[in-house]
Image (cartoon, rainbow, N blue to C red):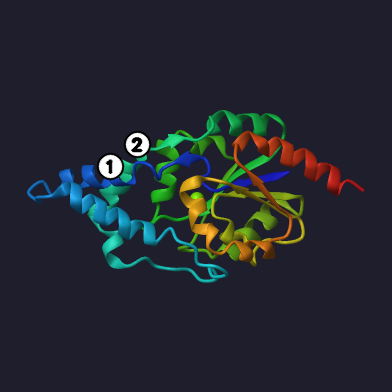
Amino acid sequence: MIIGFDFDGTLVDSYTPIEEAFKKALEVRYRWLPFKTLWAKLLTKIELQFERPTFGKHKKKSKPPFFLRTKFFETWFEERAKLTKPIDDSIELLRKLKEAGHTVISFSAEDFIDGMKVRRLKTAGMYDLFDDVIVFGHDMTIDEAFQLVREKYGDETFIWVDDKPWRFIGHGDENTEYVWYYFPFTAKFAEKNREKLALIPHLHVIRDLWSIFDVIERVKQERSP
Ligand SMILES: [Mg+2]
């Protein structure tokens, strides 16, 4: 099977250190600025606005607002990357999935700054573990990225793992199985629009990444003729 993993909130916890990373970035870039702790809190609030669901969108390529593409945010991403930790021993999980013969790809959205996702995948020590790294959002829409997976790897079952289930709506095909990794930090954004999640076919919910093996077994049985 092809297994595509989102990054933030799925393979790594990069949410807990958001505020701390802002504090560090302010220290690096704006040493003179008073009340850094307060500024860090405010910037965290702003950043989290971008994490909220946009149900049924993701149709377009997007360019983030200019202030998110500055040197300051680049520093923030770097500090955030340093503080980011794998979830559920995800590095070992990726290895085990590959050992089991699956095609394991990184399938996630670009950060505000071009190329940043790849840099962070490398910092996390995950980049080389993937058979392929596909980043959508800036140069490619989700649908184009999905099409690319199909062109490169054919029509076999695609298991798509993401902590933001609203991203699944309207994407994929009949050979796609959707796995919502329930990450409390982002799951709270889904609570308000839970009924929308009913629009997703073949949705599995896991609270531990290693449960992906149970999903694979279940899918194998359901899809065997
Ligand atoms: Mg995510």
Which residue is at the front of the view, 191 or 148?
191
Answer with the quarter of the image where residue 101 lies. top right
**Is 74 displayed left or right of 110 in the figure?**
left
Residue 178 pos. (x, y %):
67, 53
Whether residue 50 is visible, yes or no, is yes
Residue of label 1: 20
Identity of the residue drawn at 43% across and 49% down: 117
* In-image side of 221 versus 200 (left or right): right
Q: Residue at x 54, y 58 (%)?
A: 191
The answer to which quarter of the image holds residue 105 is: top right
Q: Position of residue 30 (x, y in %)?
A: 13, 50
* Mark 1 to mark 2 CA distance (whole Å): 8 Å
Which numbered tag is attached to residue 160? none
Assess whether mark 2 and mark 1 are in contact (beta carbons under 8 angstroms).
Answer: yes
Judging depth in this view, the residue of 11 and 46 nearest the camera is 46
* Kind of element beneath mark 1: helix
* For residue 37, above or below residue 113: above
How packed is label 2: few (under 14 Cα within 10 Å), some, or many (20 or more)?
A: some
Q: Amino acid at mark 2?
A: Leu
What type is the residue that disc 1 sits on? Glu
Outermost left residue: 32
- The residue indicated by pointer 2 is 83
User: What is the x, y in percent for residue 38?
Assistant: 19, 51
Q: Is mark 2 within 8 Å of ligand 1?
A: no
Looking at the picture, how far across and down is residue 88, in whole percent? 54, 32
Q: Toward the viewer: 15 or 128? A: 15
